[in-house]
Image (cartoon, rainbow, N blue to C red):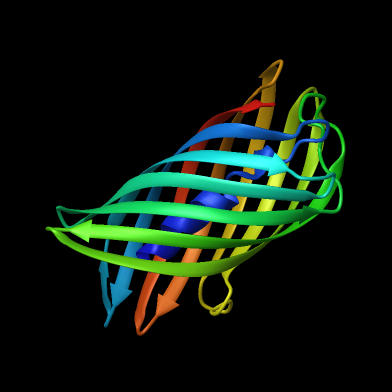
Amino acid sequence: MFKYILGVMIFTLSGFASAEMHKGMFAYNYSTIGADISANGLTVDGDIKQNSMIFGYFVNDNIELMGSKSTGKYELVGEEIDMDSSVFGFRYHTSRVDLREGTGSGLSFGVSSNETKMNYAGVSAEGSETFLSTGYSTGLGNGLSFNFFFTAQADDIGDNNVIAVSLGKCILEGICLQGGYHYSVANSDGISIDGSGFSLGFGVLF
């Protein structure tokens, strides 16, 4: 459950790596997430703070390879759970947005593998999940672009889903900023996590 929220944020909010006329991007992303856990009629508030380094590379005009490494902390009832996640995946783009100009639009379809390690009070746990995503990006002019993504766990699409939106702005040659919002729902074995949060990031085109 925890690894689901952490991994999906990385893959979902890194959509501004898709840029026409560029081979890829290095990016940094900071996100804060309010994640409430409910079980047996009891709800507990929690918070996740996460730092991510993201890399995207286009092998051709349509296929984008993506990887990321993140560290985060889940604060719950005064306790902290350390979380580390590595994500690798690819997206197929029907067409892409020119980020520098803020023009063009296109759909994308992706698959990613998320490996997560959690540590609490010296006890560690590891896991791996596969996620599917679909998205739409469009230019708004003057270096501004809009992104929408829907992401789901491949083996539990009906219960574990994320919807995310973001705005990107290229302010200098090859330098872009992005802010985003996401909402997620995860259910498993009678436990549910309802989360929402914001992210801020910047990237360098190459």
Task: Identify the residue at the far front of this view.
Answer: 59
- Counting from the top left corner in percent of width and height, residue 88 is at 56, 54
> Left or right: where does residue 13 sit relative to residue 106?
left
| Front-lying residue, 88 or 167 | 88
Q: Quadrant of residue 173?
A: top right
Q: Residue at x 64, y 61 (%)?
A: 150
Q: Quadrant of residue 50?
A: top left
Looking at the rendered structure, the number of numbered marks drawn on it comes to 0
> Does the rendering let one see residue 143?
yes
> Does the rendering let one see residue 49?
no
Task: Identify the residue at the far top of this view.
Answer: 172
Q: Residue at x 45, y 71 (%)?
A: 186
- Counting from the top left corner in percent of width and height, residue 145 is at 74, 35
Q: Residue at x 61, y 56 (%)?
A: 89
User: Where's the C terminus, which quadrant?
Assistant: top right
| Front-lying residue, 182 or 59 | 59
User: Where's the N terminus, which quadrant?
Assistant: bottom left
Q: Residue at x 48, y 69 (%)?
A: 129
- Counting from the top left corner in percent of width and height, residue 8 is at 51, 57
Compared with 158, 103 (above or below) is above
> Left or right: where does residue 176 sit relative to residue 120?
right
- Counting from the top left corner in percent of width and height, residue 29 is at 49, 37
